[in-house]
Image: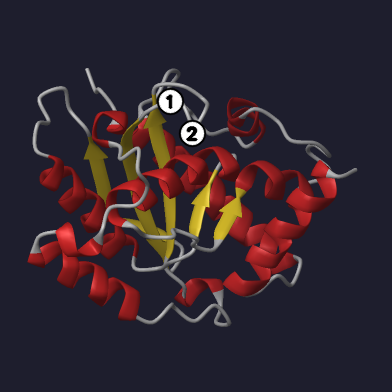
């Protein structure tokens, strides 16, 4: 059973970078210095990272992050060698090992646009973990399928639906109860379908898709 990240939280706030081992400090410096990917090219040339998290409950401030699963999508395809899975196991005893695994995710994601379902839920857990463990203000560009799907497929639904309902709409076998990686893979399949519709609607770049996601979320939450 995963125990979650709260065990290694710091009540005093972000951990001082000077207290980290050299490999983590160098990794963070390289990540911060690394360029953000261009978002003005066609979707086919953009690497998106689809992500899901495993948690002990729905509240980022009170519940525990138990794992991160992600897959990359580029040129419209998912490749087996572009995947990431992190689980905090019950026998995790070394806080530095936890930090190294979180650092590994930053290196893997490489500032790519992140795609998920219910972005505020996922981002809340990640922002807290990276702030408390690594002192990182984690604010990547997000694409939220929960709001973007009804925006681009209004003929299917004009309001957000549970994820399994969207899988049914598009005939995707969700496999019943799923772990975080299985959930990530079905999200990737939904995103592939969404990219086709985005191109049909002349939403031709990652930047425009991020703008559409933000607009859809804002308008529907404030309608």
Disc 2 residue crowd, few under 14, some 14–19, many 20+, Cα 10 Å: many
Say what secondary structure mark 2 lies in. loop
Q: Vertically, is 84 above or below 166?
A: below
Kindly identify the residue that appears in the image at 29 percent across and 72 percent down: 31
Left or right position of 104 against 177: left
Residue 39: image location, x then y, percent: 54, 77
| Residue 51 visible, this angle | no
Q: Vertically, is 149 above or below 16?
A: above
The residue that mark 1 highlights is 63
User: Which dot marks residue 60?
Assistant: 2
Say what secondary structure mark 1 lies in. loop
How much space separates mark 1 and mark 2, taking CA atoms? 6 Å
- For the N terminus, the quadrant is top left
Q: Nearer the viewer, residue 186 or 52?
A: 52
Residue 223: image location, x then y, percent: 90, 43
Left or right position of 95 against 150: left
Kindly indicate the quadrant of the structure image that contains residue 184. Answer: top left
Residue 60: image location, x then y, percent: 49, 33
Q: Nearer the viewer, residue 31 or 21?
A: 21
**Way the structure is coloured:** secondary structure
Left or right position of 3 against 143: left
Left or right position of 195 against 30: right
Disc 1 residue crowd, few under 14, some 14–19, many 20+, Cα 10 Å: some
**Mark 1 and mark 2 residues within 8 Å of each other at the beta carbon:** yes
């Amino acid at each position: 059973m995963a125990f979650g990240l709260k065990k290694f939280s710091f009540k005093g706030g972000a951990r001082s970078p000077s207290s980290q081992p050299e490999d983590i400090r160098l990794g963070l410096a390289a990540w911060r210095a690394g360029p953000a990917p261009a978002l003005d090219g066609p979707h086919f040339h953009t690497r998106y990272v689809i992500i899901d998290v495993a948690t002990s409950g729905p509240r980022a401030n009170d519940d525990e992050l138990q794992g991160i699963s992600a897959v990359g999508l580029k040129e419209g395809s998912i490749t087996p060698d572009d995947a990431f899975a992190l689980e905090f196991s019950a026998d995790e005893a070394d806080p530095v090992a936890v930090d190294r695994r979180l650092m590994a995710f930053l290196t893997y994601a490489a500032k790519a646009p992140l795609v998920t379902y219910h972005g505020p839920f996922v981002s809340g857990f990640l922002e807290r973990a990276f702030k408390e463990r690594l002192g990182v203000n984690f604010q990547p560009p997000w694409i939220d399928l929960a709001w973007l799907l009804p925006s681009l497929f209004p003929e299917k639904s004009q309001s957000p639906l549970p994820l399994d309902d969207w899988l049914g709409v598009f005939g995707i076998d969700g496999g019943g109860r799923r772990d975080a990686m299985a959930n990530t893979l079905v999200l990737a399949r939904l995103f592939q379908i969404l990219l086709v519709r985005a191109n049909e609607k002349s939403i031709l770049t990652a930047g425009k898709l991020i703008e559409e996601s933000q607009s859809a979320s804002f308008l529907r939450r404030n309608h």
